[in-house]
Image (cartoon, coloured by chain):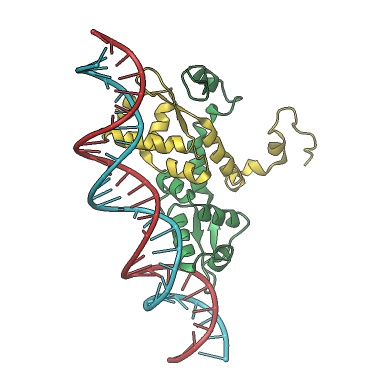
Chain colours: A yellow, B green, C cyan, D red
Amino acid sequence: MDSSLDAIFSALSDPTRRAILGRLARGKATVAELADPFELSQPAISKHLKVLEQAGLIRSGREATSRPRELQPDALKKISDWIGDYRRFWDQSFDRLDVYLSKEQGYEDDKSGD
Amino acid sequence: MDSSLDAIFSALSDPTRRAILGRLARGKATVAELADPFELSQPAISKHLKVLEQAGLIRSGREATSRPRELQPDALKKISDWIGDYRRFWDQSFDRLDVYLSKEQGYEDDKSGD
DNA sequence: AAGACATATATCTACTCGGTTATATAGCCA
DNA sequence: TGGCTATATAACCGAGTAGATATATGTCTT
């Protein structure tokens, strides 16, 4: 599993792979279940799953003859954190001190006196 | 400008382009300024800038002979919103679905041989 | 052990991508 | 106007990608 930003962003740039993640957000699924909505061959789906797994976005299990996939949120959190550095560019309220401080509960409004 | 998730994620998958965005987060810059930190040719940088612009991540201005670039946060907000749909999977305080999902067995985080 | 089933891997092809060098375009100044 | 500067575009190359079909692997069932 790579889990670098390169691999994660690259994996997410494909609509099929994002759709697969969307399906997995509703619970784990077998390869056959994941392939069903698409007009792609089974090997094509397996390839997409490999890309997602190497990016750290999903992981594989084993249940009898099937290898169900499930979401692994760490990679998504990683890019969410990266984007967070730019949040101030579109979110006006981000610049406010109280927003910084409320990252941890209980730290709220220690010195907000403007 | 495309601005689709495909184009945005794809643009962000390259470390040079992310570094360019990082530089632009500190203010607008000319192509020459953006190229300076890299050991790449000027045309290579121009290509990267074109990719970023077509994804809607930056935009070009005009000042005398230079074409300064600046951040355009809309595209970043777009993918931030997309990721937001998955926030519950890593943010405990968002809800508890992640706990429910990881209760199932058969996944490879437990690598004790059978 | 053999067959069936779910999935992975191998191989091939067309296309995209990131880089290069060479050249073109556009604005400023003497 | 001609030349300088900043940047864009064109043409090309090697590496990687997404798809296909064909085949292999691994597990359950009988």
- On screen, residue C22 versus residue B41, left or right, reads left
Where is residue A42? Give x, y as percent. Answer: 29, 32
Q: Which of B104 and D5 is in front in this view?
A: B104
* Residue found 54% across the figure and 70% down from its top: B63
Q: Which of C2 and A106 is in front in this view?
A: C2
Residue D28 higher or lower than A10, as above or below: above
Q: Nearer the viewer, residue A86 or D1?
A: A86
- On screen, residue C2 versus residue B4, left or right, reads left
Q: Which quadrant of the view contains residue C8?
A: top left
Total labels drawn: 0
Q: Which quadrant of the view contains residue A63?
A: top left
Q: Which quadrant of the view contains residue A98?
A: top right
Where is residue A36? Give x, y as percent. Answer: 29, 28
* Residue found 41% across the figure and 39% down from its top: A51
Where is residue C2? Give x, y as percent. Answer: 20, 17
- On screen, residue A73 versus residue C5, left or right, reads right
Where is residue D17? Give x, y as percent. Answer: 37, 46
Residue D7 higher or lower than A49, as above or below: below
The image quadrant where one finds the N terminus of chain B is bottom left
Residue A36 higher or lower than C12, as above or below: above
